[in-house]
Image (cartoon, coloured by chain):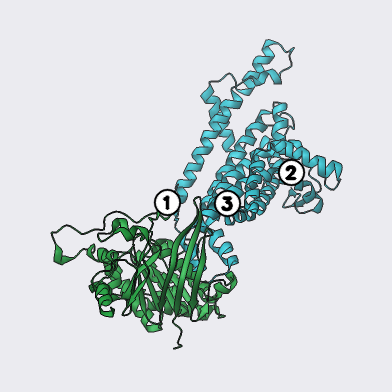
Chain colours: A green, B cyan
Amino acid sequence: MSGAPALEVTDLSIAFQSRHGLLTAVHGVSFSVGRGEVLGLVGESGSGKSVTGLAVMGLLDAAGRITSGSVRLLGTELVGLSERQLRKRRGRDISMIFQDPSTTLNPVLRVDTQIIEALTAHERLSQKAARARAVSALEAVGIPSPAERLTAYPHQFSGGMRQRLAIAIALLHRPAVLIADEPTTALDVTIQAQVLSEVQKLAADQGTGLVWISHDLSVVSGLADRVAVMYAGRIVETGSVADILTDPAHPYTSGLIASVPSRNRRGSPLAQIRGAMPSLAAVPPGCPFHPRCDFASGICARAMPEPLAFADRIVRCHHPLAAAARAETLSA
Amino acid sequence: MFAYLIRRIGQSLLILFAMSLLVFLAVYTLGNPVDSLVSPDADQADRAAVIRQLGLDRPIWEQYGLFLWNALHGDLGTSFVYGLPAVDVILMRLPATLELAVMALLFSLAIGIPLGVLAGLRPNSLVGRTIMSGSILGFSLPNFWIGLMLILVFAVQLRILPSGGRGETVSVFGVAWAFLTLDGLKHMLLPAFTLALYKSSLVVRICEAGTRDVMSQDYIRFARGKGLSPARIVCVHILKNILIPVVTIMGMEFGALIAFAVVVESVFAYPGMGKLLIDSINRLDRPVIVAYLLTTTLIFVIVNFAVDLMYAALDPRIRLSDEGAT
């Protein structure tokens, strides 16, 4: 495997043209995913996590664009590439699956059409060979009697099966990176677990780097190697999944962890972070989290905290919790 | 499927029956045909004879029963003007109107789908806005005026197209068709375009709305994420989705095309059913009017049936079952 990580995002900023002028949805986000590695991108709705995923794919709406930063896929810069050049990478080196499996597949096209077109978009192969590949792809994601199901339409599949189809299509070319935008959120809990382990296994087998976007820390915790927590368009904390879960440094991360329902705290009221994610047009000055933060002080309202690195973690907070504080005293 | 067909045919028959009742009431009972059939200086005995001969002295339900009975045997009366069975007169003119309507339909799809999809893909661009404003113009300009203007430009000023008539025809299976000759096509061009303009505006609007809707769907994002070419996304993924409403509405509008043809055929002196209807109304040729109305109804019913079948072919989620029948 080459030295360059599968995907390396540096200082990525994304803005949207709106009636209120240019609104920046994502500010200087950086992360990287190695081959076979799983990165959890966690945050509430509106934190900019899905937009980040779409921007990496080059699939932003017409109103959105990357204002600065770089996206390197297997060492190649994607920002600034023409649509035609991007198209050659999409589906082959990098793929994306979406939240709602009932809307990811075109309802009026047969499943085989949708698989074979994804194959022939990047490879020259005969109809027969394409069909054989399609069958084995369906087999790999655990769809029973794939050869017969190939000629069915998406509505003839259940939600879980549809998501498996989408995963099969996304992984057809063994991409270096798969961006999964909450692909299990719309599924039943039991199916969720199946699909989750299916994707994890396939990605690991193929050496595909996985960016798992989710609002659900408990899903990410069982899956990811590293976690990046996003708030109001910024990554506020990154680190290995074990460090982040046991020893969160950012008050927002700790709030997220506390609001995961747990059997141990049965009967006690569920902890929640007060307030709500600010809208893009009204992000508070200073640290955007300060109105909701229990540890906020005067400086939080005035200045945006700089990223603070310690061990293999980064946190963006004026008053980092335990671990970071320890690290600071150590270095002092 | 079988149950659906039976039900659908039953519905169609009901519509035809209701229409026959309306037509009968509207045409046979309003006004007195005797006035136009008997010379003004005929005496009372002559009038009574004609009334008895026409069955006008019988109760209305009996008159209707007789009308229906004859209609079921394909007899809608004899044209006063042509002295031929009314059905034959209509059938002689039907091919001209049908080919005009089909041509207009093709025109409106050929103009409307590309423009509508283009406007939908670039809703905020100059091109998109121009197309959408243009479609409003297409909606609001009256048919007959466009026809007159086209005649003025292409027939009177430029002298490249004929101003009216049907041109040469060739006979296929005993029916005269004009679309198989160059001259016939030339004659059809202007009236078909006139008819098509309004419909193409409609198609533009359906396609624009459909394209904008489909473009924002996840499956288009997913398709782009697969690395498909824009041509494939537009021609397969978008088009197949927006064709469903286009087929439905154009199917219904095909009947309207035949109805609108009344005006356009008059402007272009095009010898179709519509012109025949106007002439027959002017000459009080009642059997022909009745035959026209019932034929048009029959066409409506058949087209709607065909649209339902196409609908099911385009949208796999629709099955022609009892529950699915709408």
Q: Which residue is mark 3?
A: B208
Judge from the rendering whether residue B37 lies leftward or rightward of residue B7; answer left or right: right
**What residue lies at 67% left-to-right and 11% top-to-bottom?**
B44
Q: Quadrant of residue B260?
A: top right
- The residue under label 2 is which amino acid type? Pro
- State which chain disc 2 sits on: B
* Residue occupied by mark 1: B324
Camera-nearest residue between B26 and A215: A215
Q: Give the percent coordinates (x, y) of residue B157.
A: 86, 42
Res A326 quadrant in image: bottom left
Residue at mark 2 to residue at mark 1: CA–CA distance: 38 Å
Across and down, in percent, residue A120 comes to 54, 76
Left or right of residue A253, residue B271 in this image: right
Circle 3 chain: B
Mark 1 or mark 3, earlier in chain: 3
Q: Earlier in the sequence, mark 2 or mark 3?
A: 2
Instruction: Please name the residue that numbered disc 2 is placed on.
Output: B191
Nearer the observer: mark 2 or 3; the answer is: 3
Disc number lying in front (2 or 1): 2
At horizontal 48% and vertical 72% (from top left) the residue drawn is: A115
